[in-house]
Image: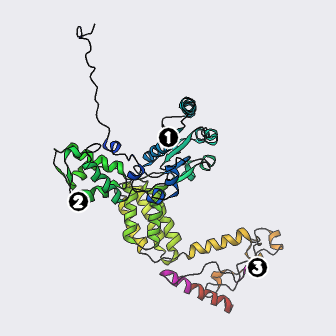
Amino acid sequence: MSLFGDLPENLPVPTLVGPPPPLAERMRPRTLAEYLGQDTVLGEGRALRVAIERGQAGSLLLWGPPGVGKTTLALLIAKHANLHFRPFSAVLAGVAQVREAVAEATERRGRDGRGTLLFVDEIHRFNKAQQDAFLPHVERGDLVLVGATTENPGFAVIGALLSRCRVVPLQPLPAAAIARLVRAALVDAERGLGVRRLTIEEAAIDRLLALAGGDARRALGCIEACAATCVDGDTLTSAMVTEAFQHRALQHDKDGDLHYDLLSALHKSLRNSDVQAAVYWLARALEAGADPAHAARRLVAVAAEDIGLADPMALQVAVAALQALQFLGLPEGRLPLTEAVVYLAAAPKSNAVYRAIAAASDVVRNGPQHPVPAHLRNATTELAKDLGHGAGYVYAHDTARGVAAMECLPPELRGVSFFTPGERGFEKKVGERMAENEQIRRARGG
């Protein structure tokens, strides 16, 4: 008896149809031939591709930014090796779930003779104990482990697990690969949007490629969002693409490689006196949400390490920018940072100060610890005076030219040069002063 009365016999049960999977999921490559954009590791004849085709890829760590095909590659590896595919999220699981997955893999092998590929997404989120739980099972071959990470495995994965897995670096997809994928999605009637008969302007493709940042998932998500606002047969425009992306999240990981890569690019652009590039990398870091204080501290380091006495004002400008940022906050704090970036990039460069302290530190670390010469020691007690401390010391301000004819290095290091001034900017003037002072000392004229 139904709530709605008696139902006739043999009534067909209706199929409940939900929303279709996202376009990015429907367009996921089904073969290695469809897998685009990673030719350096998966091109025809490459060792990894051959191993996958033979079903012998083994355990891997797939390292790369979002949307470059880590999950897809794991699925293809499982397919070629005839393995059960078991997805596993490091965000949601712990050691207990690892044990359950291993037990399930063992039970399946006993039931049908097929092994299991355990795909661990965001494996870097596991702590040491959780990663350790995989080790015995990977060693015994109970399962094939494929981990996906956006973090450098050298820092994010324990050494024992790292040594048992091949690291496969995956790059952001090139523009040509994403353009090909988008066009395929628009004409594919089975998996894509082909039944909609949509077209796309070349300018829209260009805009999409610029905003996608090498992420295929985001590119297809944008196309799907555009299609949702169109009628069949429409043309997707650049304005539609821009609107679909709206406030896109720029690539950044505050504790990971990309954060430090952006700071490295800023530092090296400043060192190379490239004003435009330095301003760009500063903007990249700030727009992606990086802590602006990190960039400000890098400016202070550049001022001392790469400019030094070629322009003594550089350090003052950098420190002032840091203080102004702390006073103003964002967004106004971007302005003193940008002002400092332009000044530092345009300033004359010298690493003489850096080389000087490095050379002196090397002598201190690796050479004997020479005693302080007696004439430079404090004579604060009668005993110290009796021992000759301070004897022979000449107060420089009592000399006619402010330079005493007195050695200040230990006798064993006399003649050693740590700081060698360059010819750029104010440092040339420093060198001239050094030469003049040395000439006074040699003349012993006081």
Distance between the alpha carbons at the discs numbered 1 and 2:
41 Å
Q: Quadrant of the C terminus?
A: bottom right
In the rendering, at what x and y percent does residue 22 appear? Answer: 32, 40
- Check disc 1 and report its element: helix, strand or loop: loop
The residue at 75%/68% (across/down) is 380
Residue lying at 55% horizontally and 37% vertically, measured from the top left: 115
Q: Quadrant of the N terminus?
A: top left
Query: What residue is disc 3 on?
Result: 412
Residue at x 57%, y 53% (from the top left corner): 154
Q: Secondary structure at mark 3?
A: helix
Which residue is disc 1 drawn over? 82
Report if residue 114 is visible in the image: yes
Which of the pair 271/418 is nearer the observer?
271
Does the residue at mark 1 contact the one at mark 2 (Cβ under 8 Å)?
A: no
Per the rendered image, the range of residues in magenta is 404-432
Mark 1 neighbour class, 10 Å CA radius: few under 14, some 14 to 19, many 20 or more: some
Question: Which one is earlier in the sequence, the residue at label 1 or at label 2?
Answer: 1
